Amino acid sequence: MYKQIIIARKDLNMSPGKLAAQVSHASMAFLTNSLKDACPMEVWDAVEGKLVNLYSSEILMEANLYEEWICGSFTKCILEARNKNQLLKAATMAEALGMKEGEDYFLIKDNCYTELKPEEVDENGVGRTLTCIGFKPMDSEVIDQIGKKFQLYK
């Protein structure tokens, strides 16, 4: 069975809406990361009578992931980390299992436009705070090696 886990920080005391948005980013990261390499193209729109700009992207994924998770059951577990250090331990565990950031797991950082205060400032002067880690869906026997160290988010 394939499963996706998302681990969110409890210490940030995010509002329900902010938490939902951050978890949504983490859940979709494995798909949206693939779309970032989309190619621009112009296509004639016969209805509008003009050229329109479109982006085209191809997403490659393992057959089991497609068949068991995309076409099957969308099992997701939202887990909690007490703080940033505990969240980063999930990334360390993932790396020890041979997983790669940006491919198998994704660190989600909020741009701090609304309710969160920046923990760091990037090279562009944008303040950001680490909120979640999202894992691509994978065999539950693999991902449970990480997930069993965390409790369900409450």
Image (cartoon, rainbow, N blue to C red):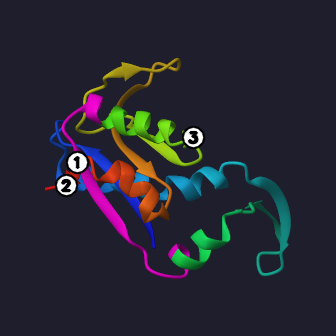
Labelled pair 1, 2 in contact (Cβ < 8 Å): yes
Residue closest to the eye, 58 or 139: 139
Q: Nearer the viewer, mark 2 or mark 3?
A: 3
- Label 3 Cα crowd, 10 Å radius (few <14 / some 14-19 / many 20+): few
Residue 30, position as x, y percentages in the image: 55, 55
Residue under label 2? 153
Residue under label 1? 80
Q: Secondary structure at mark 3?
A: loop
Residue at x 49%, y 62% (from the top left corner): 137
Cα–Cα gap, marks 2 and 3: 24 Å
Residue segment shown in magenta: 69-86
Q: Given the image, on which type of amino acid does mark 1 rest? A: Glu
Residue at x 54%, y 39% (from the top left corner): 101
Residue closest to the eye, 125 or 44: 125
Residue 53, position as x, y percentages in the image: 77, 59
Q: Given the image, on which type of amino acid does mark 3 rest? A: Lys
Residue under label 3? 100
Task: Tell me if residue 100 can be seen.
Answer: yes
Magenta highlight on residue 71: yes
Q: Earlier in the sequence, mark 2 or mark 3?
A: 3
Q: Earlier in the sequence, mark 1 or mark 3?
A: 1
When the figure is inspected, residue 92 is found, relative to residue 151, above or below; the finding is above
Quadrant in which the N terminus appears: bottom left
Quadrant in which the C terminus appears: bottom left
Magenta highlight on residue 44: no
Residue 50, position as x, y percentages in the image: 83, 68
